[in-house]
Amino acid sequence: MFQQAPRWAALAAAVFVGSILGACSSAPQPVHFFADGRPQRLSEWHVVYRDGGRLALNERVVPYDLNSPLFSDYAHKLRTVWMPPGVSAKYASVQSFDFPVGTVISKTFYYPRAAGGDAGVLRTYDQSRDFAGQGLDLEHVRLIETRLLVRRQHGWEALPYVWNAEQTDAELARTGDEVPLELVASDGARESFTYVVPNENQCAGCHVVDLKAKSIAPIGLKARHLNRDYGYPTGAENQLELLQKIGYLTGLPPLAEVPRNANWRDRAQPLDARARAYLDVNCAHCHSLTGAADTTGLSFEAVTAADRHLGVCKPPVAAGRGTGDHIFDIVPGHPEDSILPFRMGSREPGVMMPEQGRGTVHVEGLALIRDWIAAMPGQCGA
Amino acid sequence: MRGITVAFACLIAAACGQQGGKSQPRGLTADDAAFQKRLQEQFLDAKPGTVIDIPAGQHALDRVLTLRANGVTIRGVGLDKSILSFKNEISGPEGILVYGSDFTIENLSIEDTKGDGLKINDGENITIRGVRVAWTGGSQTTNGAYGIYPVKSKNILIEDSSSWGASDAGIYVGQSTNVIVRRCHAEQNVAGIEIENTINADVYENVATGNTGGILVFNMPNLSQPGHSTRVFKNKVYQNNVANFAAKGAAVASVPAGAGVVVNSNSKVEIFDNDIADNKTANLIISAYFSTNYYNKPGIDPNYDPYPRAIYVYDNRFSGGGDSPDGLDLKTLKVAMFGLNGHFPDILWDGYRDEKNLVNGQPPAEERICIKNGNSAVLNADGPHKYKNPSTATTQFQCELPKLSPVDLSARS
């Protein structure tokens, strides 16, 4: 049966159990790690579970956020990590942490509901009505899918689950799914699109960050993305320090030595840092020296030099019509002549970047990249 | 409350299932959706030795088919019978995307993908046989970029295949090593067949016609390897006169319509025994990266070599062509030198050469452009001086180069 590490027991009692008291209809079973196979239902894992009008997190399931997240059609995301007792991840400064066998990472994609039909969802960054304790308030949000990334003996596996209409459970969707949605903006403007749930191979399209190794890996669980506070029931605390405190992470250096990406939405931070953080998390899983887009000579990693390697005055290689009739990826000072914002502004497969994971244009992200290019010094003279 | 209300409503409303997931993909019939799901599962479950059969029929799909296993064969029953149509594609943008080695695909068609038709990235021992990739609306800028596109791969055989309508290159081999492209057909593309940044390629017995440019051998900057050693022989390259329909900035957007064979910035290229005819700019163009629109200092790797070196042209059968070049510069040049009814000679050279590397006014013997092709003359367009002093020359190209070895794929597993 489930055994809690002593240090965890104290924390769980202090932090998480307290948060779900009172709403709990029945005590959930502990998280079940399936060493192989593909459970048909998300509920079999017991990572998140339906608890009355909430989607609740099980004990030891720790939520986290990223400084700058991947854009996914304005979906809100509830990210969690769980590890079996007695093991922990090893800190790494640049790459994803080295997680032990048994780790289960979940990411639930959901939207705040708009008034009216079920397809209407809010296009908003406001998460203030999303939560009920550490879980989600299903009176206000609609669950779309939950993706699991599971660390098995031979490596990571990706399992996409799609929530049913009743929002009672999510079913395995290895071949993906399509969900018609309508984004409703604060001014009432509506935009229809098809939310595409990736199939397993498309999961790998982003999560195979090293094409030679071919294996998939987490993207968000890196020091620079996680180095920020999270509002736990016990109060706000740095996520990395909490993970270390509860035994999920070892080897964390003093925070002053830990890299930290900017929050792309925080206008108090430098424009360049915000843009680079945005490009890092939205593009660099493919556009790196080892990723699927290593064919292009274009990288958006946090460490990429801010010259032709980042696309400055660089002619495209295999963009085809994705150039939008522009001849360089980035023309300093001229977003209107640059390929990068052109492709971000498209929602047409074959033109748009990223190639998958969105069916709408990220208006605010695009504006950031345009501002960044507009402020960039230099020119592409002969 | 809302969740409970929705759950209750579902009990009494049969239509509720459409509101959640599991909706039928739009634009696909129920049969096609079921076919796509089964096929996706086969791609997901494939392992070494798996053969995925594509039955006869026109199958509509709306999502890329991605393969990540080694040792897989995808096999149709004929390129006119097993047809995968991506006209309604919403997620891709490729048709079939392969990350795997020891891969074979044969006897099927891929139609109307939003992006590339068939892309193979980072594989070894790749066989593409009897595959047709087509954009059925003909030459259009909105077509996908590449038809058949192996990249960063090794030991590649492409045979008896075809590409129609690619808005960049029909059959495009990039950043690869040891390649044979033979008995293929390329038509209605911007570039018919393109070998780019590739080491050791044999391109023979192909037909390239009705493209903007027929067969291209290019080197682009900033990539994983510079290419060299390509043999282009026994091909039929004629009437590639389609107006360039690539988006500006695309790699081939600077290729003038009416280009037969084009060598740009590549080295050790041998062009022989081809029938090259009626390409209205020139049957053969040899040029440097400076003749594209893309050259600029900050954006180009300083180690990139922009010059064509060691180009050997012999025993081709040229006829017609050169009579109506594309672009104002070349048109003006043609009329000025050869009159309204005249034509360029068979070979057009842009005139760029590595001035720092001349010996007695000529490139070193092993780096020269050598022409041994009957009476074929070369027009030096004098690109470096904005076409001011063009000249027709033959003597400076009278030389020979050592012949390249054939590409040998026999060691493939």
Image (cartoon, coloured by chain):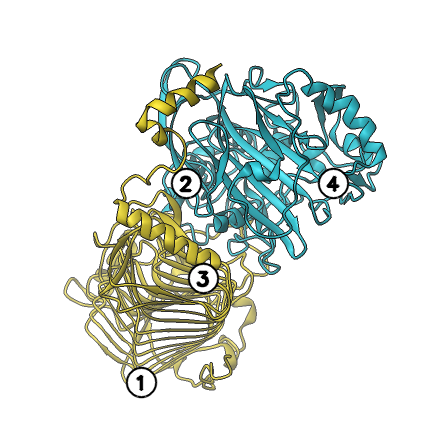
Chain colours: A cyan, B yellow
Mark 4–mark 3 CB contact (< 8 Å): no
Which mark sits nearer the N-terminus, 2 or 4? 4
Q: Chain of mark 4?
A: A
In terms of depth relative to the viewer, which is nearer, B251 or B313?
Answer: B251
Q: Which residue is mark 1?
A: B315
Q: Is residue B325 depicted above or below A300 in this figure? A: below
Would you call the spot at circle 4 few (<14 residues within 10 Å), some (14-19), or many (20 or more)?
few
Q: Which residue is mark 3?
A: B120
Q: Is residue B373 depicted above or below A128 in this figure? A: below
Mark 1–mark 4 CB contact (< 8 Å): no
Q: Is residue A116 depicted above or below A352 in this figure? A: above
Q: Are marks 1 and 3 on the same chain?
A: yes
Report, in whole angstroms, how far the alpha carbon at label 1 lies from the one at label 2.
Answer: 57 Å
Q: Is residue B302 depicted above or below B391 in this figure? A: above
Please state, as top left, top right, bottom left or bottom right, where the N terminus of chain A lies in the image: top right
Report, in whole angstroms, how far the alpha carbon at label 4 lies from the one at label 3.
Answer: 47 Å
Report, in whole angstroms, how far the alpha carbon at label 2 lies from the one at label 4.
Answer: 36 Å
Instruction: From the viewer's perspective, tell me whether residue B350 is left or right of residue B374.
Output: right
Q: Chain of mark 2?
A: A
User: Label 4 amino acid?
Assistant: Met
Residue B178 position in % (x across, y down): 48, 75
Q: Which residue is mark 4?
A: A1
Mark 2–mark 4 CB contact (< 8 Å): no
Any mark on residue A177, and which?
2
Which of the 4 image quadrants contains residue A378? top right
In terms of depth relative to the viewer, which is nearer, A134 or B352?
Answer: A134
Q: Nearer the viewer, mark 1 or mark 3?
A: 3
Would you call the spot at circle 2 few (<14 residues within 10 Å), some (14-19), or many (20 or more)?
many
Q: Nearer the viewer, mark 1 or mark 4?
A: 4
In terms of depth relative to the viewer, which is nearer, A130 or A37?
Answer: A37
Q: Chain of mark 1?
A: B
